[in-house]
Amino acid sequence: MTEIRLYNTLAREKQVFTPIDPKNVRMYVCGPTVWDFAHIGNARPVVVFDTLFRLLCHVYGEEHVTYARNITDIDDKIMKRAADEGVGIDVISDRYAKAYSEDMGALNALDPSVKPKATEHLPEMIAMMQTLIAKGHAYEAEGHVMFHVPSMPNYGRLSRHSRDELVAGARVDVAPFKRDPADFVLWKPSTDDQPGWESPWGRGRPGWHLECSCMIEKHLGETIDIHGGGQDLIFPHHENEIAQSECAHGGHTFVNYWMHNGYLTVDGEKMSKSLGNFHTVHDLIADGHAGEALRLSLLTAHYRQPIDFSLDSVAEQKRRLDKWYRVTDGVTAAADVPASVIEALSDDLNTPKALAALDALAAPETAADLKAGAQFMGFLQAGSAEWFRGEGDASAIEALIEERINAKKNKDFARADAIRAELLAQDIVLEDGPGGTTWRKA
């Protein structure tokens, strides 16, 4: 069996991946808070862990891998948008959960095995809080349930922050009812005009960290193989997940391998609406950028490294894909994924090396292997004709191409050039080749 090596954030080193049960490999990745469209930075972990999901399925078999990615559908931002629009939070969360699924699908991300919603797991959350209180790890105060950080001696081992860093980094409220400044919220009260659920501590709603612990326990078990997300989640979110789950489960290990992807910048700057460099996946797709080119752009850097996103990079990766589509046009994919691709991905998901392996196969004699490897990584999902033609009034464009062919036959090159220019003005590019003339959206 292929040996997979993964960098474990907890151990700060690459380790051989050994699943708890090879017939039941379990991975959880923090998903979206559905209050708006996902930006391109939100898409990076989706594409990264989709690639890992594909690799795990290849090695262990699709039926032996469970990939869960949650949906946070209760949050202050969702509540604010719902109040602004005068609708229920479910209207907002359903709208943007649907958009998220469509946008990530446009990046050829496979659907996770399980997509649990926070609001569907309130009984599990209440049960975990009751357990934590009974074991002395949590307490009730003024309608809140707080996790008592000093009750866990090894709290902070994932982020490796000092006590002062943990308190400062949590940006915690200095609420008078806290027993310790680092204590964090498991449950908070809701006012009459806010969404809420009944609990032993009054009407309220869960804290963000609690949701993931309970969804993991229900769908994957007390101990799982892999937990993924962005580096920004290491503290406090993932640190607090460990605290909740391990203290509730008698100290049993929560996660064996922690994986975190690096940050994304845009044109060398932190993404910001005020800088004009804020890109949602939804808008990028609507503006005509190919989902496969966006996916490829997000995989050009190693997942643990920062990546600088730009529209120029997307255009460059579109040209790279153009070559792969041309080379594989009419070719049947090989039965097996090239060993060079699997070898690269098995080394801590080294996507730059895997993409270089695909480039090395971009020749007529190895086109079948290229197609197999690229499709395995989520590329070459469209037919060549569909890829190159894109959008446009096909019948009108084909008529102009036919007129241009006739003009060239009659040596009316001025008319032929005029037709090319006319189509180019409509963002339609003509490409003449041995097999005739094809067209695509610029």
Image: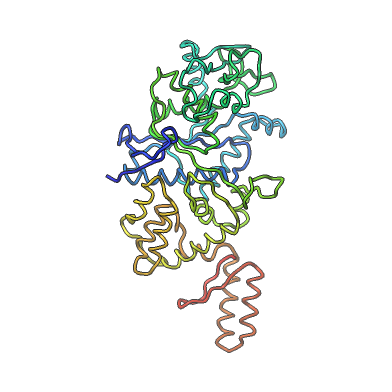
Q: Which of 396 and 268 is in front in this view?
A: 268
Q: Which of 197 and 56 is in front in this view?
A: 56
* Residue under the image location 52 percent in, 72 percent down: 438
Question: Quadrant location of the C terminus?
Answer: bottom right
Q: How many marks?
A: 0
Task: Tell me where residue 196 appears, x and y as whole percent.
Answer: 62, 21
- Decide: is 363 above or below 206: below
* Residue under the image location 50 percent in, 12 percent down: 133
Name the residue at the bottom extreme: 411
Question: Quadrant location of the N terminus?
Answer: top left
* Residue under the image location 69 percent in, 45 percent down: 273
Task: Tell me where residue 409 appears, x and y as whole percent.
Answer: 55, 87
Q: How is the image coloured?
A: rainbow
Task: Tell me where residue 336 appears, x and y as whole percent.
Answer: 31, 55
* Residue under the image location 45 percent in, 56 percent down: 379
Q: Is residue 112 left or right of residue 268?
A: left
- Decide: is 404 above or below 97: below
Task: Tell me where residue 148 appears, x and y as whole percent.
Answer: 53, 16
Q: Nearer the viewer, residue 12 or 251?
A: 12
